[in-house]
Amino acid sequence: MSVLDRPFFNLSVIKAPVAEVAQAFDRYPPMRVHSSPTSFVLPEQPYTEEQGAPPLILWSPVNAPGLTVFMPHLSAGEGYVPTYAQSTFRFDVISIRSTADDCKKDSLNEFSAYSQGALLRFVRVMSDNPGWDFYQKGDPLFFENLEKYQLRLKRKRLQRGDVLAYAESWGAPITSAMFWRSDFPAVTFLPKGSASSASV
């Protein structure tokens, strides 16, 4: 199963090559982690970071070497990566979360974009007892399908296909197989003072 066919996926894309992103973290004294090469194994995104599970990884795609992609474990406290990338290092960043369209419980489709250290745009549809919630903040970006936001059924206003299309229009060719491969070493972050994660 490809990542985009999973019942849920969560990723961020940073507008800088992976080496530049790693260097930004390594050169920032307050950071409690350092970058380390790691094997390019896409994480399975467990809800808990089980022993032996792949670490968080960052990579630059074959078809977009000027970008860095980050996929966290779901509950491993790794949200600091896109947060520092956009707020401290001021890279342009998008983050997306998506459940499959046939998911009726705990459904979520979300797109956020940051630029120059500030939130540029946020749009989200999620299931919320007893119904659905549609929320947006910031001015719509030129590629958004504003007509869908007027649909009576809130759950249809932002679906997985829309989230993927927004990512592509922003500049992340996410639906191509080459986005999920890399010609460069992948990177993980380890606590400062720990040894290298893996040889590449």
Image: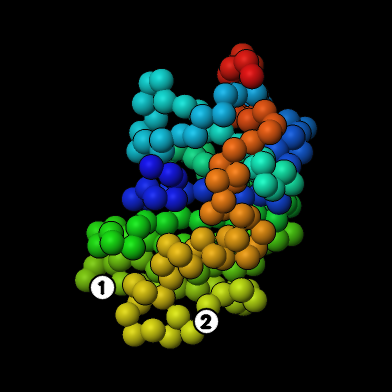
Q: Reply above or below: 109 against 182.
A: below
Q: Reply above or below: 198 against 72.
A: above
- Badge 1 crowding class, 10 Å Cα cut-off, few under 14, some 14 to 19, many 20 or more, is few
Q: Residue 10 location, x and y as percent?
A: 46, 49
Q: Secondary structure at mark 1?
A: strand
Q: Quadrant of the C terminus?
A: top right
- Badge 2 crowding class, 10 Å Cα cut-off, few under 14, some 14 to 19, many 20 or more, is few
Of pointers 2 and 1, the one earlier in the residue sequence: 1
Between residue 154 and residue 137, name the one nearer to us: 154
Residue drawn at x 39%, y 30% as measured from the top left: 49
Furthest toward the left, the residue is 130
Q: How is the image coloured?
A: rainbow
Q: Where on the picture, by quarter, is residue 154?
A: bottom left
Q: Reply above or below: 94 against 23.
A: below
Q: Reply above or below: 111 against 175.
A: below
- The residue type indicated by label 2 comes to Leu
Q: Where on the picture, by quarter, is residue 59?
A: top right
* Residue 131, label in figure: 1
- The residue type indicated by label 1 comes to Gly
Residue drawn at x 25%, y 73% as measured from the top left: 131
Residue 28 seen: no
Q: Secondary structure at mark 2?
A: helix
Q: Label 2, on which residue?
A: 146
* Residue 56, label in figure: none
Q: Residue 39 location, x and y as percent?
A: 57, 24
Q: Nearer the viewer, mark 2 or mark 1?
A: 2
Q: Residue 69 location, x and y as percent?
A: 60, 44
Residue drawn at x 71%, y 51% as measured from the top left: 15
